[in-house]
Image (spheres, grey):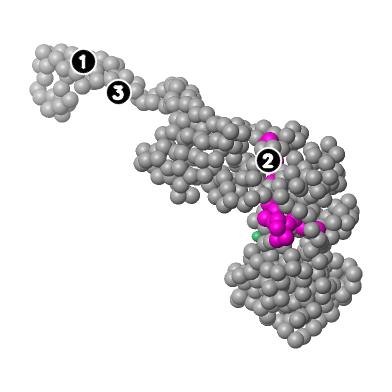
């Protein structure tokens, strides 16, 4: 049996890690985080860099910048006249590597990928957790709330190690996995708490729990069944009455009928024009199902799908009520009045021919007649209305239906509420009590690596 074995707690994890190189487990589990895909990447370190490309190794002096560029599907290091598909970058000393101007722990792997270079940071799991903290919570929060978040973040990471396996790394650095910002996202307070809680994870029946979290629940968390359609015994609705100071304790957003039609049909949730929307909510007030009545029929789907289609940021949670308003607006309109018809009613023939008259041998009567006809023509011209002018009028028109959503909370509402944890910690609850409130039936255990 390899040295890189692990406690029974992580049997599944063991398989995964051994596949990707069990040696790393002798020290500590390392993870890879894809920071970006870019056309170029610049690295440096105050202590210098060691760069490995294939079997070749290069030493880069302190603070010297190394530029890599994407060129024809490969990575080009112009200075050394090298084209490669993979480059390993290590710090020579204890100083962190700077990617651009941002410092990161551990090492870097850059890989040629279609249309750019994948910039991947490789570092111990515990250091990765440190680099997520300030992007989630303020280090000024009570330590028990911060510890709850740390344990949840660590558990979530271990549970999702294989999420980006096919792309060649463990995590992305966005909300999809967890937001990660390297050393800039660390803080001495949260770093100390990560070390204090090293290896602690949330388990259910001795297996890693699905430790999901969100910012604010709005007063009641949501069950996994209602949000994702999957029953998980410890992801159930629990009260969270400690969130009054949370920034989204109440919110209001509105969308026009057309905006909703566009978002919902783009997500293939509806067809046709919206006539009405009906909400089906839990007794606590969280919307579970939505029914949209359109000119094409009735469409019904979970509220979480609705939120996904509208946009996670645009509709902060599924804890809302809705009303429909017909909005009216004064609109300035420009119009051209139709020209007067008086000109066409003239008795004077438009076929009056001067030349015919001019060629005549005029007697006095002819002269008098001609003058009369000229006079008649002048009068007719006076009667012609002036060229049409633009007339501006204000008209009240209906803008159509607007749907107004008023709600509470921020996020999917399942699992740990970060603001709820803060409120509980402020009331004196411990990290253990916070986690067993939001994940009933779960335990905290230490994952150790041999
Ligand atoms: Zn991801």
Is residue 86 found left or right of 379 in the rendered image? right
Q: Is residue 376 magenta?
A: no
Residue under label 2: 238
Residues rendered magenta in the picture: 200-219
Instruction: State which image quarter holds ligand 1.
Output: bottom right
Is residue 366 found left or right of 101 in the rendered image? left
Q: In which quarter of the image is residue 303?
A: top right
Mark 1 residue crowding within 10 angstroms, few (<14) / some (14–19) / many (20+)? some
Question: Disc 3 on helix, strand or loop?
Answer: loop
Count all numbered tags in the image, as a single digit: 3
Query: What is the C-alpha distance between the residues marked 3 and 1?
Result: 21 Å
- Where residue 213 appears, x then y in whole percent? 70, 49
Q: Is residue 368 shown above or below 386?
A: above
Q: Residue at x 44, y 22 (%)?
A: 395
Residue under label 1: 376
Front-lying residue, 175 or 258: 175
Q: Residue at x 13, y 24 (%)?
A: 357
Q: Which residue lies furthest to the bottom in this view?
A: 55
Q: Quadrant of residue 320?
A: top right
Q: Is residue 214 magenta?
A: yes
Residue 53 seen: yes
Q: Residue at x 67, y 32 (%)?
A: 250
Residue under label 3: 339
Q: Residue at x 12, y 16 (%)?
A: 366
Single out the mark in the foreground, 3 or 1.
Answer: 3
């Amino acid at each position: 049996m390899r040295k890189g074995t692990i406690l029974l707690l992580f049997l599944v994890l063991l398989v995964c890690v051994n596949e990707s190189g069990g040696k790393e487990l002798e020290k500590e589990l390392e993870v890879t985080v894809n920071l970006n895909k870019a056309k170029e990447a610049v690295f440096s370190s105050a202590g210098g860099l060691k760069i490995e490309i294939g079997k070749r190794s290069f030493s880069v002096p302190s603070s010297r910048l190394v530029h890599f560029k994407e060129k024809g599907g490969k990575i080009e290091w112009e200075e050394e006249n090298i084209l490669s598909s993979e480059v390993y970058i290590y710090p020579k000393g204890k100083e962190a590597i700077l990617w651009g101007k941002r410092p990161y722990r551990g090492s870097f792997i850059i890989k040629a990928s279609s249309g750019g270079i994948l910039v991947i940071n490789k570092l111990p799991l515990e250091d990765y957790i440190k680099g997520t903290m300030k992007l989630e919570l303020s280090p000024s929060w009570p330590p028990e709330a911060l510890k709850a978040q740390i344990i949840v973040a660590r558990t979530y990471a271990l549970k999702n190690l294989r999420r980006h396996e096919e792309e060649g790394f463990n995590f992305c650095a966005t909300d999809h996995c967890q937001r990660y910002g390297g050393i800039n996202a660390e803080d001495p307070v949260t770093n100390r708490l990560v070390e204090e809680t090293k290896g602690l994870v949330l388990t259910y029946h001795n297996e890693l729990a699905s430790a999901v979290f969100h910012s604010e629940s709005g007063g009641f968390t949501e069950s996994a069944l209602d949000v994702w359609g999957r029953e998980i015994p410890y992801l159930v609705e629990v009260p969270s009455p400690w969130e009054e100071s949370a920034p989204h304790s109440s919110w209001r957003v509105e969308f026009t009928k057309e905006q909703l039609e566009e978002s919902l049909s783009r997500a293939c949730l509806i067809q046709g024009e919206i006539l009405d929307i009906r909400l089906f909510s839990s007794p606590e007030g969280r919307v579970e199902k939505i029914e949209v009545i359109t000119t094409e029929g009735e469409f019904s789907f979970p509220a979480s799908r609705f939120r996904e289609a509208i946009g996670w940021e645009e509709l902060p949670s599924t804890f809302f009520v809705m009303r429909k308003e017909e909005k009216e607006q004064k609109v300035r309109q420009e119009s051209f009045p139709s020209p007067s018809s008086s000109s066409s009613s003239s008795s004077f023939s438009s076929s009056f021919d001067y030349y015919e008259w001019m060629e005549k041998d005029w007697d006095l009567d002819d002269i008098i007649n001609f003058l009369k006809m000229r006079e008649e023509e002048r009068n007719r011209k006076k009667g012609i209305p002036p060229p049409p002018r633009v007339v501006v009028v204000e008209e009240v028109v209906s803008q159509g239906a607007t749907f107004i959503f008023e709600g509470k909370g921020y996020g999917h509402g399942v699992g740990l509420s970060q603001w709820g944890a803060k409120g509980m910690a402020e009331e004196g609850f411990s990290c253990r009590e916070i986690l067993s409130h939001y994940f009933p039936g779960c335990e905290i255990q230490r994952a150790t690596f041999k």
